[in-house]
Image (cartoon, rainbow, N blue to C red):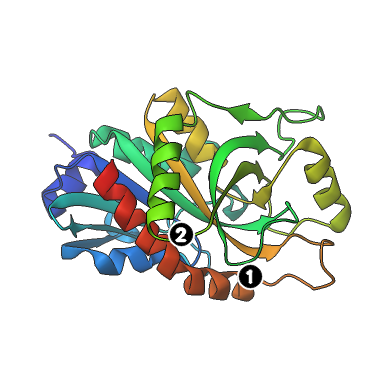
Amino acid sequence: MHFPSLAELIVEKSGFSGNLGMILGSGLSSISNELTNTIEIPYQDLNGFPISTVLGHDGKIVVGYLEDIQVIIASGRFHYYEGYSFHEVVSLVKVFYELGIQKIIITNSSGALNSSFKPGELIVINGHMDCTYRNGYKDPTIWKGLPFYNSDLIKKAKESAKECSIKLNEGVYCWTQGPSYETPAEVQELIRLGGDAVGMSTVPEVIELGRLKMDALVLSCMTNMAAGIIDKSLDHNEVVSVANKSSKDMTKLIYKLIKRI
């Protein structure tokens, strides 16, 4: 007896045959509303698939069209702090790979470490650091360029932002394990190491994309200044709220970008 894979189930339920995918972060799912002829598949309908439990993550696959371009969107991701293994956290990337997808756009919400950035602004990620200290206590390495970050896609994102009159910053994303926000002392250490933004996701997906030699572009909405940079406490509801407000710019940018790539 043949048991269909998750990729086969998605194709069976949606008829997907494109080569572009998106993984959307906290409060950034409004791009899904721009699709036409959509089919939605809740994660719980995919037997054995993890379930997204965090506020702002819808937990569903959406397949549809942006004009004549077929796109598959994972609206909601999985985090290490939810108790999932690294293998489970990157499940979306593995399924997209099985679907034959060549390019993935990843979005997330992050805290700004760079004091020249402002909440509500967008950043294209050109490098990352694994700051979880899962594998020891040495200072993390900044990883830039291939196989993780495609300079051509970054260039296209900047060109698209310019056309849309959207400010697009560029910098290094620091992955922390969470679920607690960083302390002011930890924030200062991340700045010392060369970080520009900090969050609790994305890097596992980027690592897996690099292993599978898939092209990725990471766009982040900076929803707050990281702890200690300004005298204000952090709250996830506020993160989602700012992301929702900034999603209009993110949607406009992605819409323009998809036509370029």
**Relative vertical location of residue 104 with respect to residue 234 in this rendering, above or below:** above
Sort mark 2 into few (<14), some (14-19) or many (20+) by Cα contacts within 10 Å.
many
**Relative vertical location of residue 38 with respect to residue 198 in this rendering, above or below:** below
Q: CA distance from mark 1 to mark 2?
A: 16 Å
Q: Quadrant of residue 228?
A: bottom right
Image point (72%, 39%), residue name:
131
Is 157 left or right of 229, judged from the image as shown?
Answer: left
Depth check: 241 or 259 in front?
A: 259
> Which of label 1 and label 2 is nearer to you?
1
Image point (15%, 58%), residue name:
67
User: Disc 2 designates what residue?
Assistant: 52
Amino acid type indicated by mark 1: His
Q: Quadrant of the N terminus?
A: top left
User: Disc 1 designates what residue?
Assistant: 236
Pointer 1 or 2: first along the chain: 2
Residue 107 at what x, y percent from top left?
A: 46, 53
Q: Quadrant of residue 100?
A: top left
Give SS at disc 1: helix
Give SS at disc 2: loop
Is 37 left or right of 178, judged from the image as shown?
Answer: left
